[in-house]
Image (cartoon, rainbow, N blue to C red):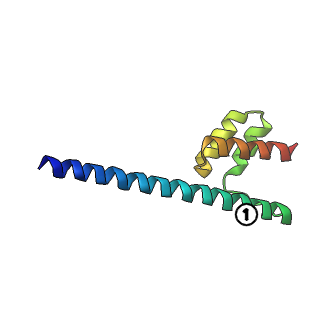
Amino acid sequence: MEIASYATLVAVIVIYGGLEARLKRMERRAARLERKADLILEHLGVRQEEPGMERVTALLRENKKIQAIKEYREITDADLKEAKEAVDRMDGTRG
């Protein structure tokens, strides 16, 4: 019985590792596609505003960049790096 338990545990670990690697590849691919779409929109001069970004813009006007990043993360579910880069771009375009 113990051997079956260990075998099951090993199988679960191997499957989990494979799924995790596949998920990371998919996330990287999605990020690349998003960057490409952003470049296309920028090239065409199209601005896509997320609902609620007015609050982020207002915080930037008040020089509250950290709060703007936090707000951006709440609105978009972006990670910290993505949010900081996006807010930096927003800050650069408003000046």
In depth, the one of 45 and 39 nearer the eye is 39
Mark 1 Cα within 10 Å, few/some/many (few <14, many 20+)? few
Residue 58 horizontal/vertical position (percent): 75, 42
Q: How many numbered marks are there?
A: 1
Q: Is residue 3 above or below residue 26?
A: above
Q: Residue furthest right?
A: 95
Q: Read off the residue under disc 1.
A: 37
Residue 87 horizontal/vertical position (percent): 73, 43
Q: Quadrant of residue 42?
A: bottom right
- Give the residue drawn at x 64%, y 42%: 71
- Give the residue drawn at x 66%, y 52%: 52
Q: Quadrant of residue 31?
A: bottom right
- Give the residue drawn at x 57%, y 56%: 27
- Give the residue drawn at x 68%, y 34%: 66
In depth, the one of 30 and 56 nearer the eye is 30
Q: Residue furthest front?
A: 3
Residue 9 horizontal/vertical position (percent): 26, 49
Q: Secondary structure at mark 1?
A: helix
Q: Is residue 80 above or below residue 21?
A: above
In depth, the one of 3 and 27 nearer the eye is 3
Would you say 12 lies left or right of 24 here? left
Would you say 26 lies left or right of 71 here? left
In depth, the one of 85 and 60 nearer the eye is 85
Would you say 15 lies left or right of 71 here? left
Q: Check disc 1 and give the amino acid type.
A: Ala
